[in-house]
Image: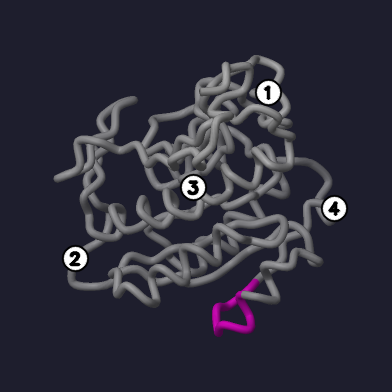
Amino acid sequence: MTISPFPSARPCRLVVLISGRGSNLQSIAEACRTRGWPAEIRAVIANRPQAAGLQWAAGHGIPTRVVSHRDHADRAAFDAALAREIDAFEPDYVLLAGFMRILTDGFVGHYAGRLVNIHPSLLPLFPGLETHKQALEAGVQVHGCTVHFVTPRLDHGPIIAQGVVPVLAGDTEAALAERVLTVEHRVYPLVVRWLAEGRVRLDGDRVQVEGCPQRTIGVEPPAGPAVAAGGAAA
């Protein structure tokens, strides 16, 4: 069983990895700042120098780094360079927040029990890309996001929490994606709070959170007769 990897006498140290605008990064940083959670983002690292989240982080006094995958001969070399940058900040947890790279088994093993990801589906449903398209094509009635510990298997690993949203009649991929993003911005900061407070226990492939037996966050459907994709109007 893995217990909180940091002493409670200091804040939990985080490094966040991004590839784009970093909206989940922003939601985590703002929650930690405004709600007084015992966590600090030590650095934001991107694989794309143009990632908009870097500018946001720098503007809020958070150190930033770029480790471009294009500067390395293969995935293993990139991951080794990335790990060196991460380790310089001595993080307790590494958070993937829209980091669009497949990581090697060695990298994942190096941060075993400390590497956390958010995926825009209710895993194990719809791993990989185009999750909202997959959900609409499958005709599911609910969709959402999953925050989980990372394992070598892509979009797989012990689930910490999930956010659930309704799939509405007439939904487009864009509309569904926006609804899922809203719940992502609730779920990921909440998980960070649990991690920072030392409440998360990882036992094999199972997660327990002290004082929180229910780890599903929902978003109510809007009022109106159309309540679900393919469903009859009330």
Decide which of tag 1 and tag 3 comes sooner along the chain.
1
The kind of residue on which mark 4 rests is Arg
Residue 198, quarter of the rendered image: bottom left
Q: Which mark is residue 70?
A: 4
What is the quadrant of the N terminus in the image?
A: top left
83 relative position to 54: left or right: left
Kind of residue at badge 1: Leu
Mark-to-mark CA distance, 2 and 3:
29 Å
User: Which residue is under mark 1?
Assistant: 136
| 186 to the left or right of 68 | left
Name the residue that disc number 2 marks. Answer: 8
Cβ atoms under marks 1 and 4 closer than 8 Å: no
Q: CA distance from mark 2 to mark 1?
A: 44 Å
Front: mark 1 or 4 = 1
Q: What percent of the width, then of the height, locates residue 98?
A: 63, 50
Q: Earlier in the sequence, mark 4 or mark 3?
A: 4
Identify residue for label 3.
183
Q: CA distance from mark 4 to mark 2?
A: 39 Å
Q: Nearer the viewer, residue 115 or 31?
A: 31
Image-based side of 194 in relation to 15, left or right: left
Helix, strand or loop for disc 4: helix
Per the rendered image, the range of residues in magenta is 57-64
Residue 219, picture quadrant: top left
Residue type for callout 2? Ser
Instruction: Identify the residue shown where x is 37% and y is 58%.
Output: 92
Circle nearer the N terminus (1, 4): 4
Task: Give how far apart the Cα atoms at labels 1 and 4 are.
Answer: 34 Å
C-alpha separation, residue under disc 1 versus residue under disc 3 = 18 Å
Q: Answer above or below: position of 137 versus 6.
A: above
> Regarding mark 1 in the picture, which secondary structure is present there?
helix
Decide: few, some or many residues near mark 3? Use Cα within 10 Å; few <14, some 14-19, many ≥20.
Answer: many
